[in-house]
Amino acid sequence: MDYPGLSIHALKDLLAARKVTPLEVTEAVFARIDTVEERIGAFITINREQALRRAEEAGKQLDRGEGGALCGIPMAIKDVVCTKGMRTTAGSKILEPFIPPYNATVIDKLEAAGAVIIGKLSMDEFAMGSSNENCAYGVPKNPWNREYICGGSSGGSAAAVAADESFASLGSDTGGSIRQPASHCGIVGLKPTYGRVSRFGLLAYASSLDQIGPLTKDVRDCALMLNVISGYDPKDSTSVNQAVPDYQSALRDGLKGMTLGIPREYFGEGLDPEVEAAVKNAVEKLQDAGATVRQVSLPHTEYGVAAYYIIAPAEASSNLARYDGVKYGMRDMDAATLMDMYKKTRSKGFGDEVKRRIIMGTYALSSGYYDAYYKKASQVRTLIVRDYQQAFAECDVLVSPVTPTPAWKLGEKSHDPLSMYLSDVLTIPANLAGIPGLSVPCGISRAGLPIGLQIQGAHFQEEKLLRVGFNLEQRLDMVGRKPDL
Amino acid sequence: MNISKEEVAKVANLARLELSEQEIIEITGQLDRILGYVAKLNEIDTKDVVPTTHALAIHNAFREDVVRHSLPQQEALANGPRQNGEAFVVPRII
């Protein structure tokens, strides 16, 4: 049996029925990794021995009739989430030797639920990028066509799940970094509401925008993962103390009484005709399921990218000041003075995109420019928040493309930062407003590249997103369509 | 020009980055284009608009000032590129 090809919920059924053990499943996943990883490059670190031990323990738990919601399920984690005793690099040379002394809260939660952590996944350095080409440890390929990007910044998290190297993964999303690679790799990806999932142990990029979320093979797995990782955490003062519903019970058939908003600004210039057709087809399927549709407007959408590329680098310039060669990571050992050590360590340790954003952010916050840039962008952020408030007064969720185009060719935009930034135009606004966004596969282009539907909702409306995504999945023949590897 | 080479060099110093002349030229060109793009924000009148720095209305999270478990010293030092068992060691400051 092809265990690595299964969803989590299908595998759980087999584990519960004792048809297979966690150890057999974990060995099968490592065999899959051994077969395809050389062609994909999704992992930075593989945690084989410890994972096999954990899988054995999970098997014993199941023997005793114990075990949490993910008992014995192998999965891998974006390398920006701290794993105790397991190297965590953020895709950067500056953290090449970093072994976290503690777990992120999401890792504690996954392990308490019995998940088997099999390794750490490739990403754009410090989550800065849309193609995963800014990684100090190699560039992962899109499993659907290896000449194409897998998306970013959680590129490895999407590629590993799409290639059946992991049953699910965790990513982080600051401007689309879960939804965009999920869309490009033909899987499900959720950016939860800001504050839904603890950020404790997530290496910070832009703290007011970052959020951890799951990438999975289908919507049911997404609901299952979200239940495990959600909830208030006293260690993250921005996590929200609000009850966590049973997300799986939101997966009901039919959308009667639900109104879908179609934001007209998301269907403008630059939208690929195949993406537009796939999204329109998806909307028809959702109408078949009983939803009503209405046009809505988010007039400040086109200003999202500009506001983001001030706010996010500004926060990054502050967050990344901690990488100075003193407490962790690499240090330039030849430097004679402290200042020299800071500068040489950071200049050798950071890649080009990270340097660019640190300089951009430092500039935007510097004396004389603060009002013109940071304050202005923060005011525009308010207008984007208001756009959503008005839209959600008229509809339950917004449906749109995730990205204007399917994945592009490796190298195509890597020398033009601005054109790369503009590709995130449809995902960035959700981060600025802190709302949840779900990416669900809705088609495949003639060139064989996946296309995703984005479903956005008001704060803490994840259940509606999942319900709409589930209904789409039931009415499209997408689940089980896999890349030929 | 939205930004000059001199400004990039000055900001790089503030950010504790050492850039080659070539890097400064490249980054100046790239930032110039990016700043040219973000200038589109000036199309919008934001007079009297309150800035948003945080998407949710969250307030300071306080807790009782009680001693709790913290990272043991050796574990906290373990990732230091240079340390002497008691502290991180850095080049002479004074």
Image (spheres, grey):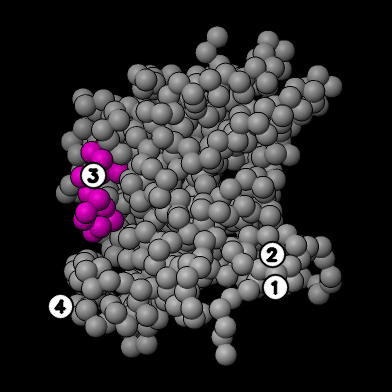
- Amino acid type, callout 1: Ala
Q: Chain of mark 3?
A: A
Q: CA distance from mark 4 to mark 3?
A: 28 Å
Q: Amino acid at mark 3?
A: Gly
**Eyeballing the image, is B89 above or below A26?**
below
**Amino acid at the residue labelled 4:** Met
Point out the frontmost of discs 2 and 3.
Answer: 2
Tally of numbered discs: 4
| Left or right relative to A270: residue A56 | right
User: What amino acid is labelled 2 in the image?
Assistant: Leu
Q: Residue at x 76, y 66 (%)?
A: B73
Nearer to us: label 2 or label 4: 2
Q: Which residue is mark 1?
A: B87
* Dot placed on the residue nearer the N-terminal end, 1 or 2: 2
x, y percentage for residue A16? Answer: 71, 17
The residue positioned 45% from the left and 21% from the top of the image is A35
Label 1 residue SS: loop
- The range drawn in magenta is A400-422
- Element type at mark 3: loop
For the residues beneath circles 2 and 3, the answer to whether they share a chain is: no
Q: Which quadrant holds the N terminus of chain A? A: top right
Q: Is residue A467 left or right of residue B75?
A: left
Q: Name the residue tied to disc 2.
A: B77
